[in-house]
Amino acid sequence: MNVYQCTFDEDVTVIEVEKTDAEYAQADEQFKLGTHAFTILGTDIKAMVIDGEWLKEDWVTDEHVQIVHAHELGHIHNDSSSELEADMTGLELVGTLGTISAFNLYCLEIQSRYCV
């Protein structure tokens, strides 16, 4: 398990779990739903949990990680489970704090996801 503060918001803890971690089995229930990460909402804890196995995929880039961090921060900052809200806030965060290549990739993802 790798635990660190999010570079986009140091008040938020990032928890990366791998299959070798005891906590992975519980988190994997969420990952099996097709997500690479999830937030812990409704508590005083501001945290996101990321699938460490996904991070090992050859195609995953720093830009993908920036997008996932920003999207999960969107859930946390809005205290919402709305994917659209998380994406809009996430896009703003990547546009302000991330790289231009991550912003462009996120725009493409949003266009694909919402047919805009």
Image: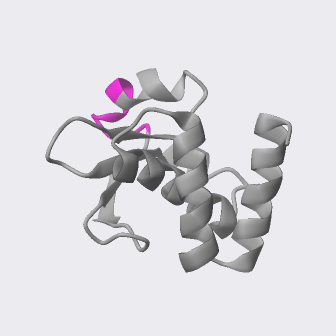
What residue sits 53% from the left and 51% below the top?
71
In the depicted structure, whether residue 80 falls above or below residue 72: above
Where residue 102 sits in the image (x, y, percent)?
70, 68
Seen as rendered, the residue at the extreme left is 44
Question: In the image, is 104 to the left or to the right of 76?
Answer: right
What residue sits 36% from the left and 69% below the top?
9
Q: Quadrant of the C terminus?
A: top right
What residue sits 43% from the left and 71% below the top?
8
Where residue 27 sits in the image (x, y, percent)?
38, 30
Query: Residue 77 colored magenta?
Result: no
Q: Number of callouts in the render?
A: 0
Question: In the image, is 62 to the left or to the right of 40?
Answer: right
In the depicted structure, whether residue 46 falls above or below residue 39: below
Which one is nearer the viewer's eye here, 11 or 81? 81
The answer to which quarter of the image holds residue 94 is bottom right
Rendering colour mode: one colour
In the depicted structure, whether residue 85 falls above or below residue 61: above
Query: Residue 25 colored magenta?
Result: yes
Magenta stretch bounds: 19-26
What residue sits 43% from the left and 37% below the top?
19
Question: Secondary structure of the magenta portion, mostly?
Answer: loop
Q: Is residue 17 visible?
A: no
Which one is nearer the viewer's eye here, 28 or 74? 74
Which one is nearer the viewer's eye here, 47 or 29? 47
The answer to which quarter of the image holds residue 64 is bottom right
Question: In the image, is 15 to the left or to the right of 18?
Answer: left
